[in-house]
Image (cartoon, rainbow, N blue to C red):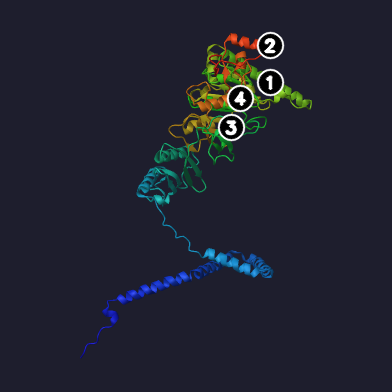
Amino acid sequence: MARRPLPRILRDGGASLARGRDLARSAADGASDVLRPLIILSRGLVRLLAAGRRRWTATPRERRGALLFLTAAAVLAVALAPYGPVSALAAVLAAAAWLGRDRAAATEESGPSEEQAARLASLYEALVPYFAVPEAPEPLYAHGGEWERALSDFGFDEHGRLAALTVAYPAYFTDGDPESRARVERLLHAKCGRGREYHFAWDEEANRLTLTALPPLPTDIPAQPFVTSPGEVVLGLTDALAVRRTVPLVDAGGAALDVPPVVWRTGTRAPEPHLLVVGRPGSGTSTLLRAVALQALRGGDVLVVDGGGTGDYTCFVGRDGVLGVECGLTGALGALEWAAGETERRLVAANRARQAGEAPPEDVRRPLWVLVDRPAVLGHLARAEGLADPQSHLRVPLRHGRAAQVTVVVAEQYDCVDGLDPVVAQYAKARVVLAPASARQAAEILGAAPQSTPAAELPPGRGYARLGTGPVLRLQVPATPDPYDDSAADTHREAVLALLPRRGGSNLAKQAGPAGEEVPVETADAVGTAGAAEESGESEEPTTRPVRVSVAEA
């Protein structure tokens, strides 16, 4: 019996089948390319119908009649309008084309790398002793547990350190206890890196703790005329999310910026008319007082009492609007006693004006600022000499200064806070804390613990501010150095000199002219000759080289 030959498809080893599959795939690809617009429109129409059906299902039964009536009215209006059906068809096709387009494929969830996962696992294990309880039936925190259940919304910076994190904690954790919060914040600060500042937001309702790495505040903002209303003082700069206001500034390089400020309001309607500044040596307390004095001189009088005797306020000697700069005990006692008497005089004058139905006198409406630096040192010297404490003269301005347009600013160091008069702590409710301080120290002065942890090293002028019962804000004081300090930057010193008023005291101060100007230093004979020439109506151009007059020479 002859054997029948195998079919060609079997003899060729499936080569023809492969060619057929390739041809079919090519035909399908070509057809899909040709019919792609139709496919997109069909897919979009299906999605439109699905969206309409979901909308109809989600509408309550009592509202479906009104919805159907509005839909019918809209269809009738479109049908009667010129070119209405064509426009409606074009709009439906455009919406279908938009909804039916090929959406970008969802990228695979890029989970943390091995190093990041190890860091998160280590952080989870470190949080176990704080959040774990043996009695919990399904503990959220347990040794060897899954960190994915507790840690979410994490983000890392370019150095591989945590920049954002959301920590879920059990409901039985005492999140209302400041000590419990502080322990967890210290742990997170240590695990995430001590070289940065972190903001902690506790959500007691959802049992969530959100950690965010804060960017550093700018330190190159010099002193300048701030755009504020009368009675407002810019204490410094803060975070953008902390306040709803910005002020235009110019940095040291001349670039224009819009920076959120910490604005302290003073005056008769100010809730907190007096300020207390606490810091450490070199932390910037004198810088803040100079910044306040420069802003106060724009529309008021300033009296400065330097209890530390450091000479940080010699640039204000003899300036217009500066009533005095006292460094000694006798001068400080006399100045503060005069401030108390001036406050009483203003109160009496304002009361008489109100009784007569008139406006208060101009000298009563003009603000008076009393800046006292290191009053505890003056109190110690006064007790050693058997004199009255100079702080006792601050009681009247502190108690009645709001009605008399008198504002008191007191600066003291941490070690001498106990030496402050109780009236200062009672009435100076606007508080500023500079230099690194623990949460307990900051809470004792500010009345509430800050929501961020300070870095290990802070620049001068960095700290926290709290105005009355408001939130605790991060603060960076503008660079306002002593213009006679050679160690400060020239741009910052020149900015301070430009803001100082003209000199109006001694003859040498009058010769110095306005702040920031170059004044020729002449001998006594030259001064006399110039004065004689001025009396005779003749004047000559100075031939000497102009140099800046210093207080030491004065």
Instruction: Report which residue position mark 3 lands on.
Output: 234
Q: Nearer the viewer, mark 4 or mark 1?
A: 4
How much space separates mark 4 and mark 2, taking CA atoms? 48 Å
Query: CB of mark 4 within 8 Å of CB of mark 1?
Result: no
Q: Amino acid at mark 3?
A: Val
Q: Nearer the viewer, mark 2 or mark 3?
A: 2
Q: Nearer the viewer, residue 292 or 258?
A: 258
How much space separates mark 1 and mark 3, taking CA atoms? 28 Å
Give the residue at x 26% y 80%.
Answer: 11
Label 2 vs 3, first from the N-terminus: 3
Q: Is residue 42 placed above or below 552 in the rendered structure?
A: below
Q: Circle 1 sits in a helix, a strand or a loop, which is it?
A: helix
Q: Circle 4 sits in a helix, a strand or a loop, which is it?
A: strand
Instruction: Report which residue position mark 2 lands on.
Output: 536
The picture places residue 339, in percent across and down from the top left corner, at 64, 19
Q: Nearer the viewer, residue 282 or 203?
A: 282
Query: CB of mark 4 within 8 Å of CB of mark 3?
Result: no
Label 4 vs 2, first from the N-terminus: 4
Q: Circle 3 sits in a helix, a strand or a loop, which is it?
A: strand
Residue 402 horizontal side relative to residue 484, left or right: right
Determine if residue 191 is in view. Answer: yes
**Position of the C terminus by quadrant:** top right
Label 4 vs 3, first from the N-terminus: 3
Q: Is residue 297 placed above or below 544 in the rendered structure?
A: below
Query: CB of mark 1 within 8 Å of CB of mark 2?
Result: no
Q: Is residue 183 placed above or below 344 in the rendered structure?
A: below
Instruction: Report which residue position mark 1 lands on.
Output: 344
How much space separates mark 1 and mark 2, taking CA atoms? 48 Å
Label 1 vs 3, first from the N-terminus: 3
Instruction: Report which residue position mark 4 lands on.
Output: 408
Give the residue at x 43% y 32%.
Answer: 457
At label 2, counting other C-alpha atoms closer than 10 Å, the crowd grade (few under 14, some 14-19, many 20 or more) is few
